[in-house]
Image: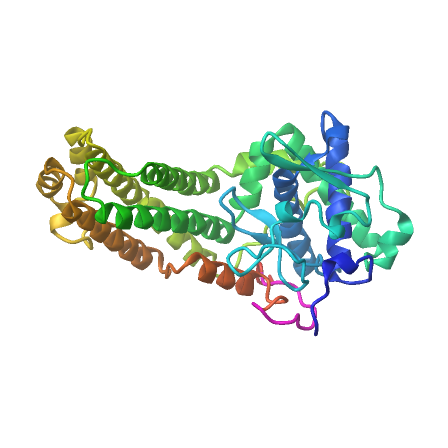
Amino acid sequence: MPLIAADKVPIASAAGRTSLLVNLTGIFVQKLQPKSEAGVPVTKLQKVLANVIWDWFTLAKHYDRFRFSVPGDLAWLPDLSGALAHLLPTTDYRAKMWFDCYHNLVDLTDSGVFKVFARTSGYEEAGERHIVFAPYAEEEVVRYNNVEPHEERYWTVLSTIYGTALHNDPDALDIMASSRTSQSTILCALRHFLEWHEGLLTCLVALGKDTGASAPRDNATGIANAGEAARKYALCLDHYVGRAESFGVIQRFAKDTELEGLVPAVVLPANDELHHLRLKALRDNTVLIFAVQALCAELLNVFNGSGADLNRVDYAARSLETFQRLGEEHRQPMYWQKTFAEPPNSEAARACSELLRSAVTHINEDAQTTMAATNDFYAGVSNMLHPLYPHKRPPLRPTVPRILPKR
């Protein structure tokens, strides 16, 4: 099946259905904004859509009354900003392909696919892309692009519920997008873990080649970014533990709608116990991640010439003592005290690189997962959650993505 160029819409296609559903959500989210004429920030729209998509698939799979078709190319995917809606490459959107797996809506704000139906326009403000939506979508356009009346109705209800959450409680919206279930939490946490690992590894390789008295500014930025990824990793896991309050918020916004009592939609998977064991392992290893991060930050101070804070080095090193699968010397505080007391040298960077590698192996074994490159991670997530869109292949016969098993 040939790919469809997105700039050839309007046509009754996956691209047309995708664009129309994005516009329907944007129209209702825009109405709830304090200044509707300012439009909707694209990342906030993606957060609303991520929740809508999760409910859409879950309701369709577990309740006979909701016979929905897949929402075009829209897909729930983990992201560095938490879970967001992205577009799988069934359609040729003639835009950047991220990690060889998906298109980002941010890259498509000025494309034909988002202008044809609702006459939207994209602009940038404070470094963020916005879309201004038309006040409504014409009825004939809705029908022509394979959106049935009941689909339009329920998609609109879901968009209104989560659009209201965006306006009144964006934290609850974010938690429901990323940490709603054990499965979604694991995937989002692993995405942050990958960013942390790859960011630190890049900096350590660069420092290992630099034995001068100062480290490049890029390394300081890289280690800071890795620290932010570690923080988001821990926050994602914490959100899952405290998600009940956010559930209540969304249930309140769904009150007096056709979906009251059904949204946010969650059905426990058959392997939920295994997921919880993996979640516990990821949470238990948060200490390990922050200890490695702290030692790498002190390594950067050594290379910058300011010297390591040996109290911080000692505290981080003692945090490693309980992780038995690490190398024995890596669990000795005196080893790190001696390593960081030396002038800048490649041996210190090598020691941190070996610690990072050991930590990743430890977490993989604990959480029963295999960390791979980001491209491979997204290919796996896409094939697992969205089997309608096999990686780099034409779509198969429509089926409901395997987000959760049948009851």
Q: Name the residue at the front extreme.
A: 212
Place of residue 294 in the rendered image (x, y in percent of width and height, measured from the top left): 26, 37
Q: Which residue is at the front of the view, 151 or 113?
A: 113
Residue 373 sits in which quadrant?
Answer: bottom left
Q: How many dots with numbers?
A: 0
* Residue depicted at 59% across the width and 55% down the height: 96
Q: Residue 383: tell me if it is visible.
A: yes
Place of residue 180 in the rendered image (x, y in percent of width and height, measured from the top left): 54, 46
Residue 316 sits in which quadrant?
Answer: top left
Q: Quadrant of the N terminus?
A: bottom right
Q: Which residue is at the front of the view, 19 or 169?
A: 19
Place of residue 317 in the rendered image (x, y in percent of width and height, measured from the top left): 17, 40
Q: Is residue 394 magenta?
A: yes
* Residue depicted at 50% across the width and 57% down the height: 99
Q: Name the residue at the top extreme.
A: 34
Q: Is residue 131 above or below residue 375?
A: above
Q: Is 98 on the left-hand or right-hand side of 163?
A: left
Q: Is 247 on the left-hand or right-hand side of 371?
A: right
Q: Is 170 on the left-hand or right-hand side of 354?
A: right
* Residue depicted at 31% across the width and 56% down the height: 366
Place of residue 236 in the rendered image (x, y in percent of width and height, measured from the top left): 45, 42
Q: Is residue 228 above or below residue 1?
A: above
Q: Name the residue at the right extreme.
A: 140
Q: Which residue is at the front of the view, 109 or 380?
A: 109
Q: Which residue is at the front of the view, 106 or 211?
A: 211
Q: Is residue 106 magenta?
A: no
Q: Residue 259: tell me if it is visible.
A: no
Coloring applied to the structure: rainbow
Magenta residues, start to end: 391-402
The main secondary structure of the magenta stretch is loop
Q: Quadrant of the C terminus?
A: bottom right
* Residue depicted at 63% across the width and 55% down the height: 95
